[in-house]
Image (cartoon, rainbow, N blue to C red):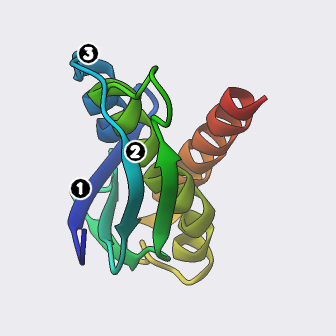
Amino acid sequence: MESPNIYYESGLGGDNLRAIMNNVSASKKLQVDDLVITGAKVSVSVKGTGGLAVPITLPDIHLTNLGQGPEGITASELTEKVLSEITNAVARHAGNIITKGGFPHQGKAAIDTVEKVTKRVTDLFKKNKE
């Protein structure tokens, strides 16, 4: 994938990428030897900021050897891995949005919300990796 545009919206109830991940149904097994996503642009929006979205460009994502062997990988598992990588990258870069004033006209309440959501997403993925 080259230069996908992704809209990431998060609130205290979760995020849109996780909702997609939860709705992908299992299918036949796949094997993905090499998946590269380059130049992904993500519009980050947090509920409570009046629909303001801040664009960020993610570093390249490179996944290899998914579904090797007879077990394979389902579309659901593949989607989970890809969205997990995207969400982790967004969580890592969301701090830059806050410190660089990505939501300057929204005031302290919006920044506090972004900080809470960023911490929640980061904690969620740390917990999932353990």
x and y, in percent, of residue 41 in the image? 30, 74
Of residue 27 and residue 83, the one placed in the foreground of this image is 27
x and y, in percent, of residue 82 in the image? 40, 47
Q: Residue at x 58, y 41 (%)?
A: 121
Dots 2, 1 in contact, CB < 8 A: no
Residue at mark 2? 83
Dots 3, 2 in contact, CB < 8 A: no
Q: As drawn, is 33 to the left or to the right of 17?
A: right
Q: As drawn, is 6 to the left or to the right of 107?
A: left
Residue 26 disc label? 3
Of residue 90 and residue 81, the one placed in the foreground of this image is 81
Q: Return the disc, 2 or 1, that comes first in the chain's sequence.
A: 1
In space, the residues marked 3 and 2 are separated at their CA atoms by: 16 Å
Q: Is residue 84 visible?
A: no
In space, the residues marked 2 and 1 are separated at their CA atoms by: 25 Å
Q: Is residue 33 above or below residue 52?
A: above
Q: Residue at x 22, y 69 (%)?
A: 4
Dots 3, 1 in contact, CB < 8 A: no
Residue at mark 1? 50
In space, the residues marked 3 and 1 are separated at their CA atoms by: 36 Å
Q: Is residue 84 above or below residue 112?
A: above
Q: Secondary structure at mark 2?
A: helix
Q: Is residue 52 visible?
A: yes
Of residue 103 and residue 26, the one placed in the foreground of this image is 26
x and y, in percent, of residue 119 in the image? 66, 45
